[in-house]
Amino acid sequence: MTMKALLRTVVLLGTSAVVVGALSCSRRGPQEGQLTICFAFQDLETEFWVAGHKAITETLRGKGIRVLERNANQDANRQLEQVRDAIAQDVDGIIIIPQDGESAVTIVGEANRAGIPIAVFNRPPSDRSKPALVVVADNEEIAEEAVTYMAKVARQKRRDRKWKPLIVVGDLGDRNAVARRQGFFNVIEKNPDLFETPIEVPSKWDPATTLANLEAALQANPDVDFLFTSSDFLYPQIRAVLEPLGKWKKIGEPGHVILGGLDGDSTAYKLMEEGYVDATGVQDLFFEAHAIMDALLDAIETGHRTPEKWIEDPGFALTQENMAERAKDMWGYRVLRGQ
């Protein structure tokens, strides 16, 4: 081999080493000692997820942590592949907002096998068979508290006939939706003298599905006068159905449909302020975001590769009665006010 050929071989070998090093992507970030966390989310279509994404990414980056963001666009298989890719890059930790409870179990299992601590934000796995850090609101209790207030309003009307309740149900593959539905029915069952059999409208957490199903339900049952939505982000669709029917009325106006929901977003706050909504269950989004980040960073720091802890957000119900005192505790109010 000539000297020129030898030099070329050395250069090529050196280049290959650099490329291989870049592809393997060490557990630490590009800066010395920098942690890398993969944040895999299913979409950013609602205000809740946007605010959660902002709180998590800004806080982690503020701590000097490298964040690999992966948006699965509501495709559970894509999210699984994205997390596998992050595992192949040997990230230090993973935070996910899964598409549903079943896919969360699968993804947590992948992280467990790789020995990478994983945290699940707000949408829990369908079972606890695999260890993970999980933060989730007490959806059943929060929903029950909001609907209890709505029932109190209904009873104060002292009508000589029962109310016709309707619930917009979320995707029942999501434990949050199951718990919210249960909270609603807990109140209905406690007040058999007050309510007729409820009408259930599936939403699949999808605005178009909600609109179509709610229109059909109101055509068949135009006397619905008590409505609970399993998520505040569906209020635009609810208004679009009620308004043409002359049922989008403020509290105190004839024909007002007693309204409530759950999440605590800025739309719900504005509708309560304007007098259309009676109550809303509020998740403490900022508590949840910071609690799950603290738990994950603690696991990374202590070398715990398969940590297990379920953190509960007790939340609360914002009602027309306590709004003056508690609105500032609502994350949607704080987002609206830029706080």
Image: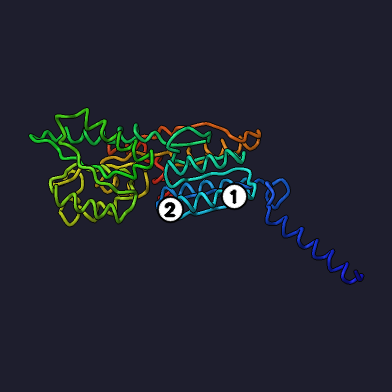
Q: Are marks 1 and 2 in contact (CB under 8 Å)?
A: no
Residue type, mark 2 in image: Gln
| Quadrant position of the N terminus in the picture | bottom right
Front one among 235 and 317: 235
Front one among 77 and 305: 77
Front one among 192 and 289: 192
Residue type, mark 1 in image: Ala
Position of 130 compared to 210: left or right? right
Quadrant of the rendered image containing residue 272: top left
Q: Is residue 263 above or below residue 131?
A: below
**Percent x, y of residue 252:** 17, 43
Q: Is residue 175 above or below residue 25?
A: above
Q: Residue at image x 17%, y 36%?
A: 197
Q: Residue at image x 60%, y 38%?
A: 297
Count the marks: 2
Residue at the right extreme? 3
Q: Earlier in the sequence, mark 1 or mark 2?
A: 2
Position of 178 compared to 339: left or right? left
**Percent x, y of residue 126:** 42, 37
- Badge 1 marks a residue whose secondary structure is helix
Position of 20 compared to 162: left or right? right
- For label 2, the residue is 74
- For label 1, the residue is 86
**Percent x, y of residue 284:** 43, 39
